[in-house]
Image (tube, rainbow, N blue to C red):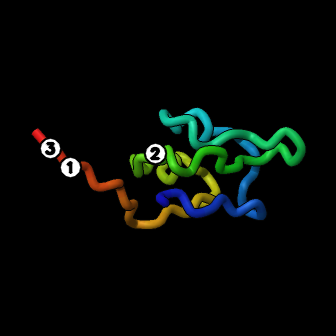
């Protein structure tokens, strides 16, 4: 998994990370009005959410495992 967590204490609910995520991994929580990880398996480790977050609330693991693809061609 790539995106680990969004620190709810640091998140100010600005939504910049939602707009910067091209894979639609991060969404805004309707109740808390803060960013949440909705689809972590779709994270492609681009790092835009990390760069754009003004409060450094986003934590991303350094690696992601991909399924092994084998060609039988």
Q: Is residue 59 above or below residue 26?
A: below
At a point 56% along the width and 35% down the height, the residue shown is 24
Q: Is residue 64 above or below residue 43?
A: below
Q: Check disc 1 and report the residue beneath it.
A: 70
The mark lying in front, picked from 3 and 1, is 3
Q: Tell me where residue 63 appears, x and y as whole percent.
A: 38, 64
Q: Check disc 3 and report the residue beneath it.
A: 72
Between the C-alphas of marks 2 and 1, the distance is: 31 Å
Looking at the rendered structure, the secondary structure element under dot 1 is loop
Q: Tell me where residue 57 appears, x and y as whole percent.
A: 64, 60
At a point 53% along the width and 57% down the height, the residue shown is 3
Q: Check disc 2 and report the residue beneath it.
A: 48
Q: Is residue 57 above or below residue 12?
A: below
At a point 86% along the width and 48% down the height, the residue shown is 32
Looking at the rendered structure, the secondary structure element under dot 2 is helix
At a point 77% along the width and 64% down the height, the residue shown is 9
In depth, the one of 42 and 6 nearer the eye is: 42
Do the residues bearing badges 3 and 1 touch, measured as CB atoms within 8 Å? yes
Mark 3 surroundings: few (<14), some (14-19) or many (≥20) residues within 10 A: few
Q: Quadrant of the C terminus?
A: top left
Q: Tell me where residue 37 appears, x and y as whole percent.
A: 65, 50
Between the C-alphas of marks 2 and 3, the distance is: 36 Å
Q: Tell me where residue 6 appears, x and y as whole percent.
A: 66, 59
The mark lying in front, picked from 2 and 1, is 1
Looking at the image, tell me whether mark 2 or mark 1 is earlier in sequence order: 2
Count of numbered labels shown in the rendering: 3
Left or right of 44? Residue 6 is right
């Amino acid at each position: 998994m790539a995106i680990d967590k969004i620190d709810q204490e640091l998140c100010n609910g600005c939504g910049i990370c939602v707009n910067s995520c091209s894979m639609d991994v991060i969404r805004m929580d309707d109740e808390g009005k803060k960013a949440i990880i909705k689809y972590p398996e779709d994270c492609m480790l681009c790092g835009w959410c990390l760069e754009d977050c003004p409060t450094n609330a986003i934590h991303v693991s350094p690696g992601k495992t991909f399924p092994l693809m084998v060609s039988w061609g």
